[in-house]
Amino acid sequence: MSADEPWVSVVIPAFNSAEFIADALASVAQQDYPHIEIIVVDDGSTDATREIVARVAPHARLLTQANKGSGAARNLGIQSATGKYVAFLDADDVWWRHKLRTQVTALQATTHQMTYSRFIWWHADSQTGRYSEPQAEFDTPRNPRLSDSPVVSGSPYVELLLDCIVWTTTVMVERAAFERSGMFDESLRKGQDYDLWLRLSRHVSMLGMEQPTALYRIHGTSITASVRDVSYEYVLLSRAVKQWGHTGPDGRVAPAKPLADRLGRAIFNHGMAHLQRGKPHIAAESFALSMQHTGWRLKPWAFRAAALLKGWVHKSVA
């Protein structure tokens, strides 16, 4: 093995992923980079996920744990990894066949310790319910489904405060980087990846790539419909601002108003979700907190009043 071709550990968290995980594993098998170890972490699946992995990827290392969430599954994969680099793949997504070679080559040629890229939104055909061939999507010039978030090299801390521009399935990172930043925060039931990218942006230099390296499959179970009591997006953004402020390690400063709007919007959206199908008292608290960031505005004030009224009606009926 050449010194220029280090091993890459591919970490795939899987929970009830029987429908799509064979496609994900096939996209790893089709990589034109040879030095790969595959680590699938089954997060307490109750379907045929483990059986499918054993059948289609017998060379993969299959780890199992009780259901703890994707962050805990990825952490177990990182702890078990032996490669210089770790690359993450969600069990319902697929990679461009040149992804690993392109990213390893780019990292080896620079001083960056992490890279991420654009991706393509992958929708099923509305008539047949079938997905297009992955390579056809990658070969489509100026694909209209290409993600439009900015890609930034160096430290994207400022951009990350305003939007989660890093998507997990496109990431490759030096395993040693986790010693500086820590790993996924398992106390966050959502947004563990966003939180980690914010922390890594403080410690390592990232390479943003325009070339899309993955397809993000859109399907009915890809986004949970449950409304959680905590807005994890707001929690992790607030924590980052409290710890590091508005300034990135490169000296750039996040503009105050867009950042305030971002924080206000995150908690406002949480309030709307609870007003519609959750807990009115959490909605009222969220709307009040939103105005602390964006100032007095009629819309959140009116929705807060509606939430308080809804909560009062519920108590009266009960």
Image (tube, grey):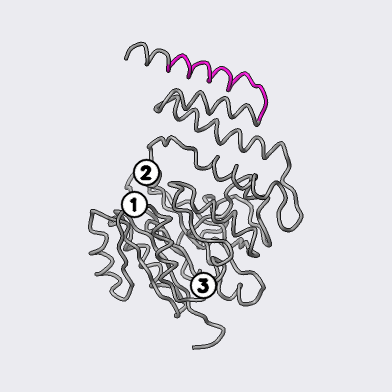
Q: Closer to the camera, 122 or 302?
A: 302
Label 2 and label 1: CA atoms lie apart by: 8 Å
Identify the image quadrant of the C terminus. Answer: top left
Q: Is residue 295 magenta?
A: yes
Query: Relative to 304, does residue 103 appear above or below in the rendering?
Result: below
Q: Is residue 21 magenta?
A: no
The amino acid marked with disc number 1 is: Arg
Residue on which disc 1 sits: 130
Q: Residue 85 got which mark?
A: 3
The amino acid marked with disc number 3 is: Tyr
Residue on which disc 2 sits: 126
The amino acid marked with disc number 2 is: Ser
Q: Position of residue 226 (x, y in %)?
A: 38, 37
- Which residue appears at 61% of the width and 48% of the height? 240
178 relative to 187 in the view: left or right: right
Query: Relative to 120, does residue 291 appear above or below in the rendering?
Result: above
Reading the chain from its start, which is encountered first: label 1 or label 3?
A: 3
- Which residue appears at 27% of the width and 55% of the height? 45
State the image quarter where residue 166 is shown: bottom right
Q: Position of residue 73 (x, y in %)?
A: 39, 59
Q: How dense is the environment of label 1, judged by Cα within 10 Å: few (below 14), some, or many (20 and up)? A: few
Q: Secondary structure at mark 1?
A: loop
Q: Closer to the camera, 260 or 26?
A: 260
Q: Position of residue 70 (x, y in %)?
A: 40, 55
Label 1 and label 3: CA atoms lie apart by: 33 Å
Query: Residues in magenta?
Result: 294-311
Most common secondary structure along the magenta stretch: helix
Q: Secondary structure at mark 2?
A: loop
Question: Is the C-beta separation of discs 2 and 1 under 8 Å?
Answer: no
Reading the chain from its start, which is encountered first: label 2 or label 3?
A: 3
